[in-house]
Image (cartoon, rainbow, N blue to C red):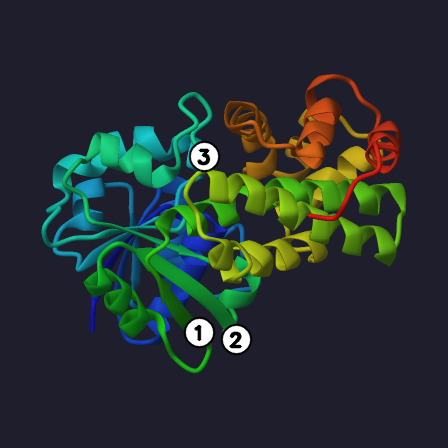
Amino acid sequence: MKKIAIIGSGSWGVALAIHLASTGNKINLWSFNEEEANMINEQKKCKFLPKVTIPEGIECTTDFKQAIDGADFILHVTPSKFTRDTVKKYKQYVDCKKQPIIICSKGIEKDTILTLDEVIKEEMPEARIGVLSGPSHAEEVSIAIPTVLVVASKEEEIQHLIQDTFMNENMRVYSSYDVKGVELGGALKNIIAFCAGVIAGLGYGDNTFAALITRGLTEIRRLGMEMGGESKTLYGLSGLGDLIVTCLSEHSRNRKAGKLIGQGMTIEEAQKEIGMTVESIDNIEVAKKLSQQYGISMPMVDAVYGILYEGLKPEEAIRTLMTREKKMED
């Protein structure tokens, strides 16, 4: 049995807590919200997963020290835009030699365009870091639907720790040394999933979705490799796998946001309707900056940026993509 701290009590944090508790581990879940913590502890419910009952072995607290004290490792599961501020608050309680931090959030810091492992390393230079990612909806993990993930770390010991702790008949975890590739696959696919939602909102069909996923993966691979990720990683679970599940599922907040905007809502209206963080909206400016910084052609990123920030109509964005200059497939 392991004692595990989970920083973040949203749907993904709770889903991971449920999975890990089901295999006999003791979970201390941290929430920024007292009301949310009380709901988990007293009612055994999570407002983001209303159909699920929280099992025994999970306690929720708003106290970082209480959550982290004695933990074998820490799962960081807050929205990417809150990562730095949250780490600043809990880093004093972490024993870096004994408590690896496993990043389960997907995104890139907007102001610095740093990946989340780089953000945590800036705040905690001695931290031992892993990244857990792949095609996984909280709604399905929380009810034990078979799921396959990948854990990346420069340390083989951390890879094996996560595999040994997470794996059972409902979850398989592959290992990788490619931290950068796993992070970028998880972060960038959200933007393509937003595009998939726009397509759904406009009423387009399977031909368009297939083209979107294929060419979207090309954009992710171009940038990911330029930033140090490996091609095989971006064609794997955290790249192609996560791209497929996020583009095609109604569980996806990113897809839903795009769909609402495709149907005519504003960004603000879509975010209010969804009621949770939409990572694609938070990260589109980052992807635009990165494509410019590295000189990478990313037409879909340009189109989404135009829709969100330049008043480009979704129909016109599609028309622009379809009528670009002819070229060889790459």
* Classed neighbour count for the residue bearing mark 1: other residues with Cα under 10 Å, few (<14), some (14–19), many (≥20): some
- Outermost residue on the bottom side: it is 169
Label 3 sits on what residue type? Answer: Ile
Q: Is residue 45 left or right of residue 37?
A: right
**Residue under circle 1?**
171
Image coordinates for residue 89, horizontal then vertical, percent: 23, 31
Task: Residue type at mark 1: give it.
Answer: Met
Q: CA distance from mark 3 to mark 2?
A: 28 Å
Check if mark 2's residue and mark 1's residue have beta carbons within 8 Å: yes
Report how far apart the C-alphas of labels 2 and 1 lie in the structure. Answer: 6 Å
Cα distance between the residues tagged 1 and 3: 26 Å
> What is the quadrant of the N terminus in the image?
bottom left
Residue under pointer 3: 108
Q: Is residue 75 visible?
A: yes
Q: Secondary structure at mark 3?
A: loop
- Front in this rendered view, residue 7 or 240: 240
User: Badge 2 is on which residue?
Assistant: 146
